[in-house]
Image: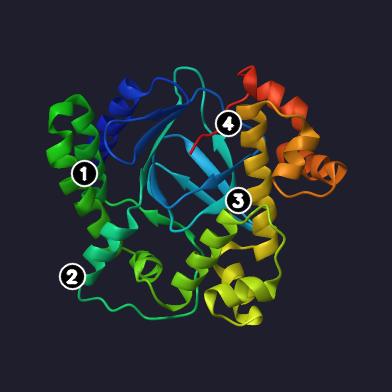
């Protein structure tokens, strides 16, 4: 039964993908397709979301941690995380297929409040996790994707199916991580606040003391919990965000490397070029030209 349901998921994704990344009319739902496997990892930022693999396999690197998932799993990101992703088992005629559903933290919080499971301010856990995809959760996602073929029903039924997906996620093996993140208090909420602050101030220099004051933690406690959630320090996180934003600017605004370096907060264009090449595999302008030519896919979840 589960195999037939997964085959239906694959067929719907195949029918509705129009490129590498396909936004859909269902709020928060995006489809992904790749005809080629990759030997190198693509740097990108995962936003809060749940991802399902319809076909293929992927390895995701977060700091020094590696997460591998297939069509038997789901991948859950509870906060914004700079990662590197590598697609396996993809070829013309047998493409990599996946989907992501953005997490609505307001809706998650509302559902969590109705559940009897308490929220404990336990030790912080990693903001990225792989879980086992059971048949009830798979069925929910298939029902959500079926709405792409009955778009007139999306406004009425998509919120109901999405709510059920979030309920099952909160009830599942990584529900505690989600409940901590969306609770609005405790260490997980403070780290989420620190991440949002860095994303908003990525081009500005800051100290550990400054960030600790913002989220009302001691510097030592902030660093420990931040590393537990993101597998990197706040300054390492800032650097990854700067480089991702620099890549976006190079593509969108066609600036030169030096101008882009200053825009994202680098005082030294040469340091920027070295770190950019180390992260993306090529110097800034070479990388941007390759991306514009379509020779490389930028985002595959």
Q: Left or right: 298 with respect to 31?
A: right
Q: Dot 2: within a 10 Å radius of its alpha carbon, few (fewer than 14), some, or many (20 or more) residues?
A: few
Which of discs 3 and 2 lies nearer the camera? The answer is 2
User: Are the two marked residues, 4 and 2, in contact with CB atoms closer than 8 angstroms?
Assistant: no
User: Real-space Cα distance between discs 1 and 2?
Assistant: 23 Å
Q: Which mark is residue 250?
A: none
Q: Which mark is residue 139?
A: 1
Whichever of callouts 4 and 2 sits on the residue coming sooner in the sequence is 2
Q: Which mark is residue 61?
A: 3
Structure colour scheme = rainbow
Residue 252 sits in quarter: top right
User: Are the two marked residues, 3 and 2, in contact with CB atoms closer than 8 angstroms?
Assistant: no
Which of discs 1 and 2 lies nearer the camera? The answer is 2
Is 285 rendered above or below residue 280?
Answer: above
Q: In terms of secondary structure, where does tag 1 sit?
A: helix
User: Real-space Cα distance between discs 3 and 4?
Assistant: 16 Å
Which of discs 3 and 4 lies nearer the camera? The answer is 4
């Amino acid at each position: 039964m589960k195999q037939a349901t997964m085959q239906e998921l694959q067929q719907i994704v195949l029918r509705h993908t129009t490129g590498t990344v396909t936004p859909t009319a269902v709020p928060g739902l995006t489809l992904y397709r790749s005809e080629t496997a990759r030997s190198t990892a693509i740097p990108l930022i995962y936003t809060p979301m749940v991802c399902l693999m319809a076909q293929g396999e992927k390895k995701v690197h977060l700091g020094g941690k590696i997460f591998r998932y297939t069509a038997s799993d789901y991948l859950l990101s509870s906060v914004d995380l700079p990662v590197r992703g590598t697609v396996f088992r993809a070829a013309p005629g047998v493409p990599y297929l996946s989907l992501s559903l953005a997490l609505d933290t307001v809706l998650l919080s509302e559902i969590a409040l109705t559940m009897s499971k308490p929220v404990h301010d336990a030790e912080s856990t990693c903001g990225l996790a792989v879980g086992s995809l059971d048949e009830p959760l798979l069925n929910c996602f298939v029902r959500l994707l079926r709405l792409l073929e009955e778009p007139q029903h999306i406004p009425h039924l998509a919120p109901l199916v999405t709510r059920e997906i979030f309920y099952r996620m909160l009830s599942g093996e990584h529900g505690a991580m989600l409940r901590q993140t969306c609770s609005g208090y405790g260490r997980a909420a403070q780290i989420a606040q620190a991440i949002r602050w860095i994303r908003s101030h990525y081009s500005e220099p800051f100290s550990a003391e400054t960030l600790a004051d913002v989220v009302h933690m001691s510097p030592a406690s902030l660093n420990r919990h931040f590393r537990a959630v993101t597998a990197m320090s706040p300054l390492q996180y800032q650097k990854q965000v700067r480089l991702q934003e620099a890549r976006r600017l190079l593509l969108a605004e066609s600036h030169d490397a030096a101008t882009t370096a200053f825009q994202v907060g680098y005082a030294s264009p040469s340091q920027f070029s070295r770190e950019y090449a180390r992260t993306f595999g090529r110097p800034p302008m070479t990388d941007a030209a390759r991306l514009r030519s379509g020779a490389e896919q930028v985002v595959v979840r």
